[in-house]
Amino acid sequence: MEEKKQLYTLLVYSENVAGILNQITAVFTRRQVNIESLNVSASSIPGVHKYTITAWSNEDQIQKIVRQIEKKIDVVKANYFTDEQLFIRESGLYKLATPMVLDNPEISRTIRRFGASIIEVNPTYTIVMKHGITEDIISLFRALDTFGCVLQYTRSGRIAVTRGMVEQVSEFLEQRESDEF
Amino acid sequence: MKDRITGSKALMRALQAEGVKTIFGYPGGAIMPVYDALFDYTRGEKKCFDHILVRHEQGAAHAAEGYARVSGEVGVALVTSGPGVTNTLTGIADAMMDSTPIVVIAGQVAISTLGTDAFQEVDLVGVAQPISKWSYQIRHAEDVAWAVSRAFYIARSGRPGPVVLDFPKNAQVEEIDWQPMKVNFVRSYVPYPKLDAEAVRQAAELINNAKKPLALVGQGVELGNAQSELVRFLEKAGIPAGRTMLGLSALPSNHPLNVGMLGMHGNYAVNLKEQECDVLIAIGMRFSDRVTGNLKTYAKQAKIIHLDIDRSEIDKNVKTDVAVVADCKESLPAITALINKNDHKAWRDSFRQLDEMERTKVIEPAIHPKEGPLLMGEVVNAVAEQSPDDTILVTDVGQNQLFATRYFKYHHKRSICTSGGLGTMGYGMPAAIGATFAAPNRTVCCFMGDGGFQMCIEELGTIMEQQAPVKMIVMNNHYLGNVRQWQDMFWLRRKSFTKMLNPNYELIAQGYGIPYAAVTDRKDLAAAVKKMLSTDGPFILECAILEDDNVLPMTPPGMDVDKMMLEV
C-alpha cells in the first residue's frame, strides 16, 4: 500500500542565476511527481529568488525531493510545509460576457458574495478578480460557470509565507557570511 | 602595465593556478583557440601540462576519472563542442554516481549563434545538469578565472563530483586584462556540514551498548582521507567491518577487523551478519541496492548509524536511527573519543564458520581449480599473488569486475578504480590510462572481459602513443558473461545475444606494438603473469576462460541479503 498523499508546499530560495528552475523541476521529473503549481519571484533578500511549488506527495518522498533540491549548488535553502504551517494566497481572473452580466443580476450578487472585485468593464467583457485559497477561487469559477457567462478563467500559482517568526533563509545567509570570515 | 590576454590563455593560467598537471583531451573546431594556447603550455620553457591525446572523448572522461580516483586530485578532460562533449556524458554520469572529482571543459559555438542549431552546437548545460554537480557556460573571457576556480572548488570539495564548463568560442578569443581569482566559498553551498555533538554522543551510546556491532565502510573514507581514523575507530571497539566495492582499499585486506566485501557478490558471512548485527554503522556509503538487496527486510533488527557528508543520502534508502552528517575525517575521531574499549571477540569469531563455508564451497574452487579450463578467479588470484603491494586494481564491468574485486588484495589506500554506481562497460582501459598518469611509480593492473575490452578498444592507441604501462588482463570467455549468468539463472538459459565472435587479439596487440601473451593452460599462468609484470610498459595478457563460469556467492536481485546463495 502506498502511503497516503497530501498537498505539500515547497519554499525554495536560490541565487538569481540561469538554469536553476530546470534543475529544481528535474528533481520532480526524475521521480515522476507532477508539480501542481509554481511561482517564481524575487524574495525579500537582494539577489535571492523564491520558488513556491506545490505537489501531491507523501512525507518520505517529499523529504527526499527537498534534500536533493537543496543539494544543487546555487540553491540556498529548500523546505517543505503543509497548509497549516503557511499563510497562502492565490489569485483567479475571470473574463465574463458583459451582456450576460447585465441581463442576470444574480451574477453580480455571486461576485459580491465571494468577495471578488470587478476590475474592468467594457461593452464586450467584464474582468473579475478574486484572491484567496484554491478552493474559494475554484468555487467562484464553478458558480459563475453555471450562468454560462465565463469566456476565460485562469488561476495563479500559489504564493505563501511561513507562519513562523523569522525567515529561515536570512538566518542561514547570516550564518554563512560569518563562516566566510 | 595591463596584462592583456585571450580567454583561451586565461584558461591556461586558471588551470595552472588550480595545480593541474595532466589534461586528457581531443581537439575539434569549437575548442581550437584553447588548443592553440595549449601548444605553448605543453612544451619548451613554459611547459606546465602534459596533454594526453585520447582516441575518443569517452576515453578522456574515464581517464580523468581514473586519474582523480588514484591521485585524489581533480581530473581534467578537454574536448570540443557537440559530439565531442556528448561523448563524455557517460563519464560525467559515471563520475556523478561514484563521487569522482573531474572537470570537463568543452568548446561551444559563439554565443551569438547559440540556439540556432549551429554546426556542432548542443545545449551542453541543459544536458549535463542532471548528471553533474555543477554545469556552467563561460559566456565571456572575463568570467574564466572565476568559473574555473569555482569549478575546481565544487568538484573537489564536500562530496566530490563532475563539473562541466561550456566555453563558447567568442569567450576563447576575446581579450581581457588578466585578474587571477580564487574561489573557496559559495554561500549557497555547504560542502562540510558542521558536526553535531549530540548526534556524535547518540552514535557513541549506541555503539557502547552494542553486543554485535558491524561497520560498513564506503568510498567516503577514501574521499575524506580518513583511512587511519577508520582503523582507530574500529580497533578501539573491536568492530568488524565490511567494505563496499568502491571502499575496498579504505581498509587493508589483511586487517584483522576486515570481514570482506558487501553486496550482491560480496562475502557470505558479512551479508548474513547484516541481518544479525544489533548496531550497523555505515561510514561514507550510500546503501546502494546492490548492497542492501530487499530493503523491506534489510537489517531490520539493527539500530542504524549513518555517517555521511551528504545529507541527501540520509534516510534515502535505509531509515537511520542516528545520522552524523559531516566529513568522516572529523566525525570518526569524535565518535572514537566517546566509545569504550571493547573487542567483541565472540561476535567476531562467529563470522569464521560462515567464512569457512564460503572458502570451501566458493573460494577454493574459484582460485585453485584442479581441472578444466581457466577460471577468472584463479587468474585474478595469480595476478594478486605476484603484484607489488601498492598495485592499483582497475576493472571493467561485469564478471571480470566481480571476480577481480573479490580476489584482489588491497594493502594501500586509493588502490581501486571501478565503475560501481553506473556500471559502465568500457570504463576499464581509459581509467587505467588515467591511473598510470596519477601514480607513475605504481603498477596498474586492468582486468577486462572480452566485451568491455572492445568497448573502448580504441584507447589502445593512447596506450601505444604514451607507452602507458597498463597491464591489461583480458579474460576471454566469448560471452558477455554477467548477462549470460543471469540468463542461465533467471531466464531459462535463453542466451539472447550474449555470445560473441571475437577478433584475434594477438593481431590487434601486434598492430599497436603492445607485448602480448596468451594463456590457455593453467600450468602456464604463473609464468605469463610474471612476464607481464616484469615487462616495462603496457602488456596484454589474454586468458582463455571457461565459458559458463558463474560469479558466486550471489544474492539474486531484490532478494533478502541473508538468502545469498553459495551455489547455483
Image: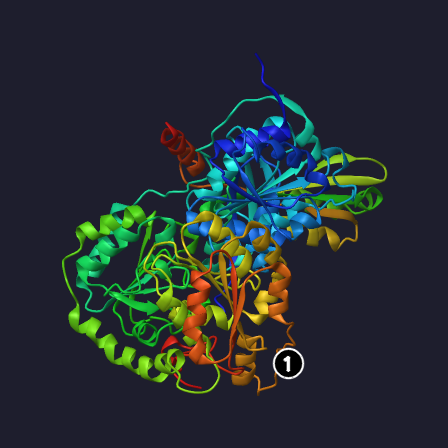
Instruction: From this view, report whether residue B413 is shown above or below residue A175.
Output: below
Q: Is residue A96 above or below residue A49?
A: below
Classify mark 1: helix, strand or loop.
loop
Q: Is residue B26 found left or right of B557 in the rendered image? A: right
Vertical comparison of B345 with B326: above or below: below
Q: Is residue B530 left or right of residue A142?
A: left
Question: Which residue appears farthest toward the left when viewing the image?
Answer: B341
**Three-letter amino acid code at the position of disc 1:** Ser
User: Which residue is painted at 61% across and 85% down in the image?
Assistant: B494
The quarter of the picture where the N terminus of chain B appears is top right
x%, y% of residue B483?
56, 76
Front residue of B213/B540: it is: B540
List x then y, in percent, for residue B415.
39, 57
Q: Residues within 10 Å of mark 1 (few under 14, many from 20)?
A: few
Residue B234: where, in percent of width, then height?
23, 59
State the colouring used for the structure image.
rainbow
| Residue B373 higher or lower than A11, as above or below | below
What residue does disc 1 label?
B496
Q: Nearer the viewer, residue B418 or A155?
A: B418
